[in-house]
Image (cartoon, helix red, strand yellow):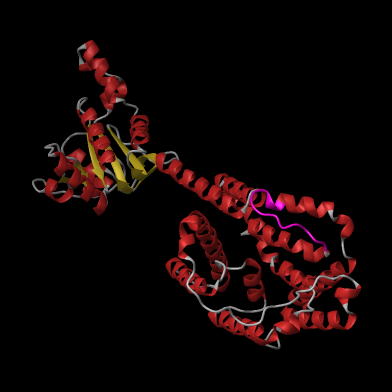
Amino acid sequence: TTAAAVHVFTSQIKDLLGIHLPRRRGLLKVVYTYYDVFNAIDDINIAAMVIAGITIIAVVFNNEVLKPRVSRYCAFPIPIEMLAVVIGTVVSVQMNLHDVYNVSIVGDIPVGLPIPELPPLELFPSVIVDCFVITMVSYSISMSMALIFAQKMNYEVDANQELMAQGLGNLVGSFFSCMPFTASLSRSLVQQTVGGKTQLASLISCFLLLFVLLWIGPFLTPLPKGVLAGIIVVALKGMFLQVKDLFKFWRLSSTDALVWIITFLSVIILDIEYGLLIGALLCFAKLIALSMKPYTCKLALVPGTEIYLDTNRYEKTVELPGIVMFHYCGGLNFASKLHFRKEVFKATGVNPQMELNRILKMESKENASESAKNLRVIVLDFSALVHIDPAGVAALRNLVDDYMKIDVSVYLAGCSGPVFETMRKCSAAERTTEAFMMFPTVSDAVNYARHESVIPPIAIPSSPLWTTCPMQNSHEENCMSRL
C-alpha cells in the first residue's frame, strides 16, 4: 500500500504543478512519468501550484492543529475538504482562473446514468487473462485497505465477504458499462480522514455522488483540479508513514524486511500487478524454505521437574545417559524428510547406516563408536508436529528401522490426533506388522524406557521424574500405544 500511494501521488503531480503530461501505462510507468515531469519543468503553472499549495496547507493545518482542539468541544469535525471544494469553485468563477491563468479545471461532468444493457459476451475470450490480473490486483488492494482501516478502527474483516461484495458489485456494474472497481486509495483515505468510519458513510457518499451525477455536476465544472489533488495528497500521509514499518520488520526479521523492500521497489519501478506478483512469489518461496527446514532441537531435563527444554537455550538442563530427546517443530513431508533425518543424526551423534557398516566390516558390535554404544533410546517429541504425509511416515519408518538394526529404540511422543490418524492409515495401507512406539508425553516415554531397563536408572535430586506410571503390569497399556 505504501508503494501504491507513490502511484497515487505520481498521478496527482500534473494537477499539483499545472502541467500537461502524456498518460503512461505498463512497465516503468512511474519512472517515465517523472521523466516527463522533469522535461516539462519549464511549463509549471504558478497559479495552479499556489492553489494546490494553499489547499494542502489549509487541510494540514486543520488536521494537525484545529481538529484536535475542536474535537474537545464538538463531536463534528470541520468539513475542511468540502469547504476547500466550495471555496475553490467560487474563487475559480470569480477570478476566471481557467481563462486568465490557464488553470486546469474539472470540466464537464456528464449528467445522468447510462441505460442498462447486456455486456458483449463475445469479448470474453479476449479479456479472460486481463480479467484474472485485474481481479488479483483489485482484490489485493481492497483487502490491504480494509486491513489497514480495520486495525485503526478495531474491527474484523471477513475476506470472503469482501470478495463476494466486490464480485457482486462488478457483476451489477457490468450492465451499466462500468469499469472494474476496487477500493480507491485516495478516496478511501479522504473518507477516513474526514471521519467516515462505517458503511453508512459510504452509503451517504453514494447518494451524494448520484445527486452530483443527476443534478449538481454542472456546478462543479469550474473547480480547479489542484484543489482535489491537494486534498488527495494530504490524505496519503498515513500511507507514506507506513514506511516506518520497514525498520520494525528489519529488527524483527531481516527476511521480511527484504521482502518488503523488493515488493516496494517492484511496485514503484514496474507496476502494481507485477509488484504484487513478485511479493506473493517471494512470500511463497519463504514459506517453502521454512517448511523445508523447520526448527529442531535436542531436549534435556530440568532438575527437579518433568520439564524438558532446549539444551542450546537453557544451560542448567541435565542430559539423561543413554537417551536422546529430539524436538521437531513443523511439518514432516516429502520436502522436509531429508532435513528431519539429518537433524536426528546430528542430535544423536549416531548415523545408523555408518555404524552398521562399521560393525559389519569389523564383524563385531564391539567396534561400534562410543556414541552408538552409549545410545539406547531416542525419543522424538512430536508435540509440535503439525502435519505428516505418507512420504514423511515412510521416512520415519525407515529411520526407526535403521536404528533398530544397531539396537537403538525410537519412541514417538506427543503426536496429535490428525498425525496419529495419518500414521494409522499409512500403516493399514502398507499392511506392515511393525509398530511405532507412541507415548502421550516425553516423560511417559522416558519412564517406559527406564521401567523396561532400556536405560540405566538416574539419580536426580528432588526430581519427581520417576514417580509417574508406577504400575508394573498395566504400565504399557496406560502410558504407551502401538501403531
Q: Front-most of 167 and 121? A: 121
User: Farthest residue toward the left?
Assistant: 473
Q: Front-most of 228 and 482? A: 228
User: Farthest residue toward the right?
Assistant: 100
Name the residue: 27% across, 32% down. Answer: 322
- Queried whether the magenta region covers residue 297, the answer comes back as no
Q: If the image is split into quadrants, where does the N terminus sit?
A: bottom right
**Residue 59 in the image, given as x and y percentages of width and height:** 77, 75
> In this image, 424 relative to 54: left or right?
left
> In this image, 290 relative to 302: left or right?
right
**Residue 70 in the image, given as x and y percentages of width and height:** 73, 84
Query: In the rendered image of this protein, does residue 49 appear above or below residue 332?
Result: below
Name the residue: 49% across, 66% down. Answer: 120
Q: If the image is split into quadrants, where does the C terminus sit?
A: top left
Residue 410 visible: yes
**Residue 157 in the image, given as x and y percentages of width and height:** 48, 69
Name the residue: 26% across, 32% down. Answer: 399
Query: In the rendered image of this protein, does residue 199 appear above or below residue 317?
Result: below
User: Farthest residue toward the top?
Assistant: 362
Q: Quadrant of residue 331?
A: top left
Residue 79 visible: no
> In this image, 170 relative to 411: left or right?
right
Q: Start and end of the magenta stretch?
A: 19-30
Q: Main secondary structure of the magenta part?
A: loop
